[in-house]
Image (cartoon, coloured by chain):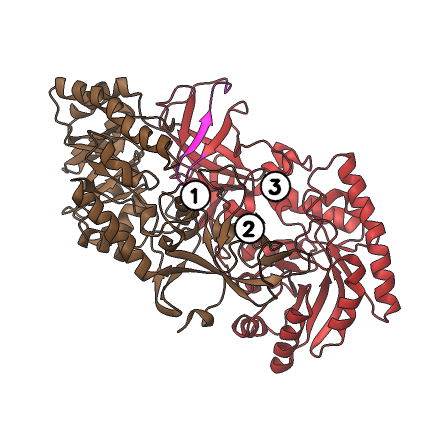
Chain colours: A brown, B red
Amino acid sequence: MRIADLDTPALLIDVDVMERNLCRVAAYAREHGLRLRPHTKTHKIPALGRRQVELGAAGLTVAKVGEAEVMAASGTPDLLVAYPVLGPRKLARLMALPPEMRITVALDSLEAGRELSQAAVAAKRKVGVLAEIDVGLGRVGVPPEQGAALAQALAGLPGLEFEGIAFYPGHVKLMDEAGARAIAGLSEVLAPVLDAVRRAGLDPKVVSGGSTPALFQSHLAAGMNEIRPGTYIFNDRNTVVSRACAWDDCAATVLCTVVSTAVAGQMVVDGGSKTFSSDRLSASPEVSFGHVIEAPGAVFTRMNEEHGYIDVRNAGRKFAVGDTVRIVPNHVCTAMNLHEQVYSVRGDDVVSVWKVEGRGKLQ
Amino acid sequence: MRIADLDTPALLIDVDVMERNLCRVAAYAREHGLRLRPHTKTHKIPALGRRQVELGAAGLTVAKVGEAEVMAASGTPDLLVAYPVLGPRKLARLMALPPEMRITVALDSLEAGRELSQAAVAAKRKVGVLAEIDVGLGRVGVPPEQGAALAQALAGLPGLEFEGIAFYPGHVKLMDEAGARAIAGLSEVLAPVLDAVRRAGLDPKVVSGGSTPALFQSHLAAGMNEIRPGTYIFNDRNTVVSRACAWDDCAATVLCTVVSTAVAGQMVVDGGSKTFSSDRLSASPEVSFGHVIEAPGAVFTRMNEEHGYIDVRNAGRKFAVGDTVRIVPNHVCTAMNLHEQVYSVRGDDVVSVWKVEGRGKLQ
C-alpha cells in the first residue's frame, strides 16, 4: 500500500527517521554513561518499547498503571511508573504486573508511599521507590531541601526499596545558551540533596531526570545518571522550536486532506483538535498548530475538532479541495493518543499498521 | 455502585441534568417552530441520539462518516453529515449506510458536490445536499453572495436533492446583548441569499444554523428554520462563560484524585490534557481549564498530559493527597472524545456505564 491510498486524517511514522532518532540517543546515553529509561507515553506501542530496550535502554517509563499493563508486553525487565499510584484497585493491578519485571514508582508524598508499601507487603513483592523533587517546573516533587527527609521516610517503609531521586526539568524548554546553563545548574541543586541522602545512610543509586528538549545537554547536569526522554523517538514541532532537532528529524506527520478553500487566503484540512490535540507550542508564545511540510510558509492558525484552518497567503503554492498535505504536530504525544492506529512508512510506501495499544489509558 | 467506588479520572454524566437540558431545548425548538437536528459530536453515544429523536429531534448531525456509521444505531430517520465527504472509500461507506436513513451532506465546493453526486448515482441512492455559506466565522462556506450560485450548481448534479442552506454562527460566542444582536443580524445576511436561491427556481426548504451559545436566541434569526446545537445536552464551562447556562445545568464533570500537594499553594490532580483536552475557553481570554465544583475559588491554571495544576490559594479549603474533586471541563465534546466509557450518575450513585461508541472516529 502507498501513502496515497490512505484515508485521512492519518498519523504516519517514518521508520527510518525513527530508527535514526533511537540510535542517536542510545549512542549519546552510552557515550556519557547515562542510564536510559525512555518514557513510552510518546509512542504507546509495546513493539517500540522493545526496540528501545534492544538498543540499550535499561528499562521503560510510564505514567499510569494502564500504560504499565500495556507496556509489559514489551518484555522490558524494568519499568518505572513516574506517577504516584493511589487507591486499592490501581495498586492491586500494579502488583499483578509480571513478577519478573522490576517495578519502581516515583512519588512525592508519604501518603502515596504508605499506600504503595501496604500493597507491596500484601503482594509479597519488593517495589523500588524514587523520591521526587521539584527542580523548577513547580508541578510535583518536594522542594530539594525536603528531598532527604522524604527519601528517609520512604526507605523506612516495608516492601519498598529506596532507589534514589527523580525530577523532571520540564521548565527548561529552549536549548539556547540559557537552557544549557539551566541544565548545568541542576548540578548545584542536586549536590546538597544527594549529600543529605547519603548522610542519612542511604544510597541514591538512581538520579533520574531528563526530558527531550534538554536531552543532549544531560551530561552537563553532574549527579544525574539516568534520563527519561519520551518525544525523541518521533520528535515534533516543539522539539524543533526548542532547537533540539531539525525538521528532518521529525518522524511523525499527520496526513490531511484539504476539504475547503471557500474562504479567501485560507484552506481547511480534515484534521483539527480531535486529530492533533489543541496543544500549543511549549517554548514559544506563537499560537499555531503545526508545520505543513509541502508549504513551510503556510500557517496553521486555528482549529476546531474536525477543522484545521491554514493561512495560505504565504504558502508559495495553490491548494485545491482534495489535495493532501503532511503536517508535523506541535506535540506528538497528545496526537498519538488520539489515533487508534498509525501507519509506519518508508518513502511513499506504507510499511505496516501499528495499533496504539497504550492509547487512552487514563487510569 | 457509588461514585466513591470509581477509579479516577472518570467522566460522569448527571442523567437528571442531562434530561432537563434535552427537554428544555426540545420545548424551545417546538415553541419557535424550529427543526432540531442536534450535533452528536458532543455525546457520541447512539442511545443518547435515540433519546434526542424521541424528544422531537427531526434528525441528527455528525461530522465524519465514522460517526455516521456509529449513529445509525440510534435509529434516526434522518442524518446530516455537516462536512464534505471526499474520496471513494469514504463515499462508499456513506452510501452503505442503512437505506431507510435519509442522508444529507452540507458542503461548500463543487468538487465535493461532484464526488458526492457520482457516488450517489453509482449507489442508486438519492442524497440531500445543503449549500454551506460563511456568516462570519471564516471557517468553511462560500461568501453569502455566492450561495445561490453554489446552490444552483449542486441542484444540477444527478443523484443529489437540493434541500437548502447551512451555516454555522460559531463566531457568536457570548450571549450578551451584542451576541443577541449578532444572531438577529443573521436575518439580513440570510434574506438576500434565500431570495437569490428562490429566484433561481430552487426551494430552500431547510435553512440550518445554530450552535449552543446562541441557542436560545435562534428565533431572532428570521429565515433560519433549523438548529444543530450539540453541547446543550451536557453543557460545559464554555457554555456557562458564554452566559447560555448556569453551573447547575452542567451535566458532565470529571472525577479526579489529588495526587500531589508538594508545591505550596497548589494541588495536582490525575487529569490533564489526556483527560480534559487542552482546549482553552472560547469566549474568554482567561487561560484556565475547568471549574472545581468543591472549590469554585480554585483555579485550574495549567496542564500536562496526566497532571492538572490547580491553584488552591483561594480555594477556601484544604485538600490532601487522595481526596477527589469533580471538575466541569472547558469543552465537553473534546473531553468526551478522550474517554472509552463514561458513567451516568444520579446523586452519589452510578446508574450505568456508557461506552463512547463514536469516540476517535477521525475518518
Camera-nearest label, 1 or 2? 1
**A109 above or below A47?**
above
**Residue A84, quarter of picture:** top left
- Which numbered marker is on residue A241? 1
Q: Which amino acid type is shown beneath numbered disc 2?
A: Phe
Residue B220 seen in this snapshot: no
Magenta run includes residue B230? no
What separation in Å lies between label 3 and label 2 (alpha carbons)? 28 Å
Q: Which residues are magenta?
A: B303-315
- Identify the element where label 2 is drawn: strand
Q: Looking at the image, which is closer to me, B104 or B186? A: B186
Task: Tell me what residue is drawn at x 31 percent, y 55 percent.
Answer: A45
**B325 above or below A74?**
above
Q: Which residue is mark 3?
A: B235
**Residue A314, quarter of picture:** bottom right
Task: Tell me what residue is drawn at x 30 percent, y 61 percent.
Answer: A16
Magenta run includes residue B308? yes
